[in-house]
Amino acid sequence: MSNQNLARLLKALTWIGAVLLLLMPSLAWLWRIDAWPGFRNAMPEQVSGDPVVLILLLLPFATVAWGLIQLSGFCSRLQRGEHFSRAASTALRRFGLALVVGAALLPLTRVLLRAYLHAGDSSIALAQGYLRALPILATAMGLILGLIVLVFAAILEQATALAEENARFI
């Protein structure tokens, strides 16, 4: 498979990922939440139609979806053979930042969502909705992957500077 075809495939996958990231929380908001096993403990009652719930559900996912769209821009540059460009490293950096911010927003929005849905509960009860292995793992992996992408973007930025410097000599 050529680099251009691989870049096209990666670009399509980034858009599919962005759509899925926005679709899943939106569907959870539209339908009975207690029918979704992953949401059952965090939000036991039906919350369809409440815009505050939608915003809190979507915020971390929308952040990462925006990052995937930025990654799609990186793929466009790969497709054109612009591997070493400031725009390519900027797109990667934005994707990494979106992963880090999205991962940081996930626990915050989940605690705020529990507080909104269970007004009057103790702060311990609110934290218990998040203090489980899967949400903590999702946050940790989002942070780690985001930091890896940020390091890779910094490496690409340095490689771009070297390529530009070498091009001036030739």
Image (cartoon, helix red, strand yellow):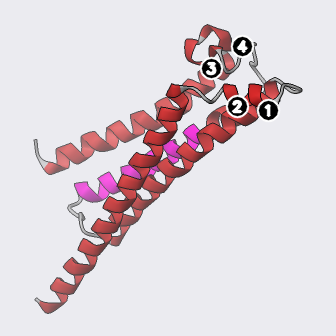
> Do the residues under discs 1 and 2 have CB atoms within 8 angstroms?
yes
Name the secondary structure under disc 4: loop
Where does the C terminus fall, quadrant-wise?
bottom left
Q: Quadrant of residue 47?
A: top right
* For marks 4 and 3 on the same chain, the one whose residue lies earlier in the sequence: 3
Region of the chain picked out in magenta, as a range: 60-79
How far, Cα to Cα, is label 4 from label 1?
18 Å
> Do the residues under discs 2 and 3 have CB atoms within 8 angstroms?
no
Q: Amino acid at mark 1?
A: Ser
Q: Is residue 135 above or below residue 15?
A: above
**Numbered-mark total:** 4
Q: Which residue is mark 4?
A: 44
Q: Which residue is mark 3?
A: 28
Q: Are there few (<14), some (14-19), or many (20+) residues within 10 Å of tag 1?
A: few
Q: Amino acid at mark 4?
A: Pro
How far, Cα to Cα, is label 2 from label 3?
21 Å
Identify the residue at horizontal 35%, vertical 71% (top origin): 86
* For marks 4 and 1 on the same chain, the one whose residue lies earlier in the sequence: 4
Q: Which residue is mark 1?
A: 123
Q: Is residue 138 left or right of residue 115?
A: left
Q: In the current view of this chain or complex, which residue is farthest to the bottom?
A: 169
Name the secondary structure under disc 1: helix
Q: In the current view of this chain or complex, which residue is farthest to the front?
A: 124
How far, Cα to Cα, is label 4 from label 3?
12 Å
Residue 127 circle label: 2
Q: Is residue 29 left or right of residue 2?
A: right
Q: Is residue 96 above or below residue 17?
A: below
Name the secondary structure under disc 2: helix
* For marks 4 and 2 on the same chain, the one whose residue lies earlier in the sequence: 4
Of badges 4 and 2, the one in the foreground is 2
Q: Nearer the viewer, residue 119 or 57?
A: 119
